Image: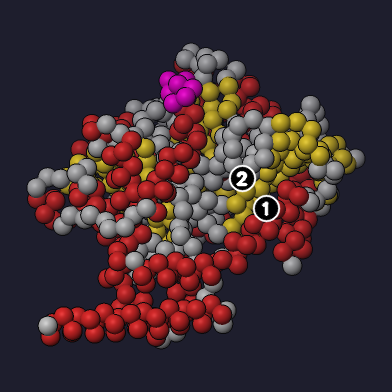
């Protein structure tokens, strides 16, 4: 009787305490300290039994009125974007990467695998990069999979994302998971899911995964070491490494090896893949940058601790060491080594950064040229890229008599899907403007390893002819016309930032600018509403087929006494970061050839592009003012 009365009193006290906590949350919303969305997500964690272990900490945050912490932790529920789930790490919350959101992700994947695949597909492989907590998150994922009865292979230590793609195929797994936030700052981490093809999950499967994740309540989890001991979790390493490296090196297209290069893994996993492969391929003059060699999730020697080799400052920081060794070129992989940045030495000894689109042109031309020389090139072969990558790929492919597939949304998963739908034997090369490249059929994701190998081979071939990568670029521009590109991104963080991004996207559709800097826009392709509209009246003139995505592409022409320049502006909200991205292109006008000297044309067209960029920036700021 006494125990019963005590239990009733305890439950009553808990109810009173919960009411007080909920009242505090409501007051915080009224006072503008907490958004409605954050309050709803927080209330779920306060009232649902599966979150009981977090109650003491949540109550502490509320008692101490740490509303900003709670707002940052609960303002949204992280969705699967173009590369899975990615966001800042924290102790708890729906809007961050933490033990609960990782376990939910793993549970959702496990449920989906068991529902959609036959028992022979109930196998998974997990990889992780050098980021803080990556190993912890990988072990949580493995423990959840093991509890679901899924045979799980776990890499013994950090590895590259493309090796994870390779391992899915090599081990005949139904799914793969890579714990990585790619090139993001140190505070972030992510959960990237690969289908049994080795490619990242496509939209329909991502939607099914999201539904399974959101349905998660109680999550089964095995003890990691018990599952390791009884074989439900199996560690893998060198055997897969060797097979992966062999697969890359077997795609070599040249015997030339006389090139000096500096390589940086940017504190990531690149030494295990890029550096190992190129050294095994015979590039003995490739030197690894010692300051950024240490695998470290804090990225201590990366500029601003932001290890993205797309950023000029990352490659520029490597120049002093490159000059010390008289390097012909610099290459740098991002922390999970699926992307690679490039800088080439000019005749005056300085180094020129070659962006993703231009690196893509160099690689495409090299691969096509080598296949043509070997007599293996056919009209059935194809190159694949995305709608926001350089249109220069079309004349390059045309010159070699192969197909170019460009109607793909952003995300290398679409290139991987095109490989399978069009036939991997006919696939020669795929690239994205964001320094992601792939050749060969051994994986279905971008890979800095094969890109690094081919860039070194191309540079060595050119060096043997007394030329450089920069010389070859100019030859391509002379042959196909001068193409230049730039990017503009508007970062908008938090819930208010999301509203700003939505506001910009809505304005681009309903009341787009007719003029941006010097260019008069004449049409827009809307891949969300599947229509082509004329400008400035914004009137539908034609339907637009697949694909479906939140992407707008504007086209226009700039007429000057020096000739006509075509301008393209592509706009899309990022699927992994809180920003809206704009991709700007200036190129030969349709059905016209460039007539100016290349040196004059470069200056003229880049001035046009800069003016377009400035005009677009002004329009964005006016739109959200």
Residue 292 included in the magenta stretch of the image: no
Position of residue 461 in the picture relative to residue 498 (left or right):
left
Label whose residue precedes the other's in the sequence (1 or 2)? 1
Q: Relative to 406, is 303 above or below?
A: below
The residue positioned 68% from the left and 43% from the top of the image is 552
The residue wearing badge 1 is 505
Span highlighted in magenta in the image: 420-427
Q: In the rendered view of the protein, which quadrant contains the N terminus?
A: bottom left
Q: Secondary structure at mark 1?
A: helix
Binning the other alpha carbons within 10 Å of mark 1 as few (below 14), some (14 to 19) or many (20 upward) gives some
The percent position of residue 263, horizontal first and vertical second, equals 41, 49
The residue wearing badge 2 is 550
The residue positioned 77% from the left and 58% from the top of the image is 619
Q: Secondary structure at mark 2?
A: loop
Pointer 1 with pointer 2, Cβ within 8 A:
yes
The percent position of residue 187, horizontal first and vertical second, equals 42, 66
Q: Relative to 621, is 126 above or below?
A: above
Q: State whether residue 456 appears in this view.
A: no
């Amino acid at each position: 009787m006494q125990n019963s009365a005590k239990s009733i009193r305890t439950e009553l006290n808990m109810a009173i305490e919960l009411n007080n906590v909920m009242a505090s949350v409501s007051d915080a919303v009224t006072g503008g300290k907490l958004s409605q969305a954050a309050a709803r997500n927080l209330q779920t964690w306060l009232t649902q039994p599966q979150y009981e272990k977090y109650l003491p900490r949540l109550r502490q945050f509320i008692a101490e009125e740490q509303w900003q912490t709670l707002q940052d932790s609960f303002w949204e529920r992280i969705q699967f974007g173009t590369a899975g789930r990615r966001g800042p790490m924290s102790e708890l919350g729906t809007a961050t990467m933490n033990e609960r959101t990782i376990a939910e992700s793993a549970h959702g994947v496990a449920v989906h695998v068991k529902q959609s695949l036959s028992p022979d597909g109930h196998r998974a492989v997990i990889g992780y990069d050098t980021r803080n907590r990556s190993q912890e998150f990988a072990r949580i994922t493995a423990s959840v999979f093991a509890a679901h009865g899924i045979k799980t292979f776990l890499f013994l230590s950090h590895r590259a994302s493309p090796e994870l793609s390779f391992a899915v195929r090599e081990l005949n797994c139904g799914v793969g998971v890579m714990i990585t936030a790619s090139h993001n700052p140190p505070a972030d981490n992510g959960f990237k899911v690969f289908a049994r093809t080795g490619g990242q999950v496509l939209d329909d499967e991502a939607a099914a995964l999201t539904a399974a994740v959101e349905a998660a309540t109680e999550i089964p989890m095995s003890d990691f070491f018990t599952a390791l001991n009884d074989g439900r979790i199996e560690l893998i390493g060198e055997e897969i490494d060797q097979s992966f490296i062999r697969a890359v090196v077997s795609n070599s297209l040249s015997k030339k090896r006389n090139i000096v290069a500096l390589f940086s893994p940017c504190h990531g996993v690149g030494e295990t893949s890029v550096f190992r492969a190129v050294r095994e391929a015979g590039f003995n003059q490739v030197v690894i940058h010692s300051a950024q060699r240490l695998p470290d999730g804090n990225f201590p020697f990366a500029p601003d601790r932001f290890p993205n080799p797309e950023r000029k400052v990352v490659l520029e920081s490597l120049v002093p060491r490159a000059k010390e060794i008289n390097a012909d070129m610099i290459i740098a992989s991002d922390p999970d080594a699926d992307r690679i940045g490039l800088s080439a030495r000019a005749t005056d000894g300085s180094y020129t950064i070659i962006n993703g689109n231009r690196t893509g042109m160099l690689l495409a031309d090299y691969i096509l040229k080598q296949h043509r020389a070997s007599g293996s090139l056919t009209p059935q072969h194809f190159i694949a890229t995305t709608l926001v990558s350089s249109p220069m790929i079309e004349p390059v492919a045309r010159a070699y008599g192969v197909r170019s597939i460009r109607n793909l949304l952003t995300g290398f998963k679409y290139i991987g899907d095109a490989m399978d739908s069009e036939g991997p034997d006919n696939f020669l090369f795929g690239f994205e403007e964001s320094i992601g490249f792939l050749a060969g059929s051994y994986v279905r994701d971008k890979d800095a390893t094969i890109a690094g190998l081919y860039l070194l081979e191309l540079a060595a071939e050119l060096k043997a002819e007394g030329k450089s990568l920069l010389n070859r670029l100019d030859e391509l521009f002379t042959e196909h016309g001068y193409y230049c590109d730039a990017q503009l991104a508007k970062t908008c963080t938090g819930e208010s930032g999301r509203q700003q991004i939505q506001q910009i996207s809505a304005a681009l559709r309903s009341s787009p600018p007719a003029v941006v800097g010097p260019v008069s826009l004449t049409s827009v392709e809307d891949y969300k509403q599947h229509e082509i509209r004329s400008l400035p009246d914004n009137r539908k003139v034609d339907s637009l087929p697949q694909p479906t995505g939140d992407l707008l592409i504007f086209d226009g022409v700039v007429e000057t006494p020096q000739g006509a320049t075509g301008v393209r502006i592509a706009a899309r909200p990022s699927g992994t970061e809180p920003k809206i991205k704009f991709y700007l292109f200036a190129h030969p006008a349709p059905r016209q050839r460039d007539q100016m000297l290349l040196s004059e044309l470069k200056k003229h067209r880049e001035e046009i592009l800069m003016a377009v960029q400035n005009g677009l920036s002004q329009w964005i700021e006016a739109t959200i003012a």
